[in-house]
Image: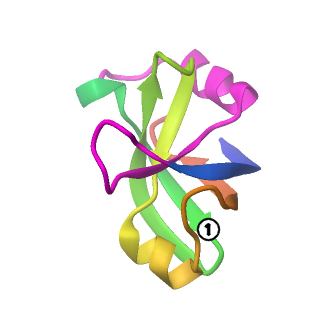
Amino acid sequence: MRFRFTAPLWEWSAQGGWFFVTLPDEAADDIREVPRMPRGFGAVRVRVTIGGSTWSTSVFPDAKQGSYVLPVKKAVRTAEGIGGGDDVEVALEVLDL
C-alpha cells in the first residue's frame, strides 16, 4: 500500500521539538481498513521518502484530527531544508500489511 501526497509540516504544541505531517483522509481510511496485529499507541510501520531522504518509522492515529500523523525527525528536516508550515511532498509505503 503506497501513497503520495503533499501536506504541511506542523509542530506539536504540547511538547516542542516534535514535527508531524497529517496524512490525507483517504490514506488514513485505507490504512485503518487493513486488519493488523495491535502495536503500541496504534502505530503502523511505514517507509517514507521526503526529497532525497528515506527512512523507516511509524504513523500514529490522532483521534483529534481523525487521521494518522507522520513524525518527521530533525535530521530529515535539516537535510531537506524544511520547517514548520512548509508544504512537504511525501511518498509513504505501509509495511504492516
Instruction: State whether residue 74 is above or below residue 57.
Output: below
Report the span colored magenta.
11-39
Snapshot colouring: rainbow
Q: Is residue 42 magenta?
A: no
Going by the image, does 35 lie left or right of 80? left
Kindly identify the residue that appears in the image at 67 percent across and 58 percent down: 91
Quadrant location of the N terminus in the rendered image: top right
Is residue 30 shown above or below 90?
above
Can the viewer see residue 39? no
Residue nearer the viewer, 84 or 58: 84
Q: What residue is at 40 percent from the left and 42 percent from the top?
A: 12
- In screen coordinates, is 17 left or right of 87? left
User: Closest to the observer: 70 or 20?
Assistant: 20
At label 1, the amino acid type is Ile
Residue denoted by label 1: 50
At which x and y percent is residue 44?
42, 36
Q: Position of residue 27 (x, y in %)?
A: 69, 32
Residue at image point 33% right, 22% down? 37
Q: Is residue 38 left or right of residue 2?
A: left
| Residue 16 seen by the camera | yes
Q: What element does badge 1 sit on?
A: strand
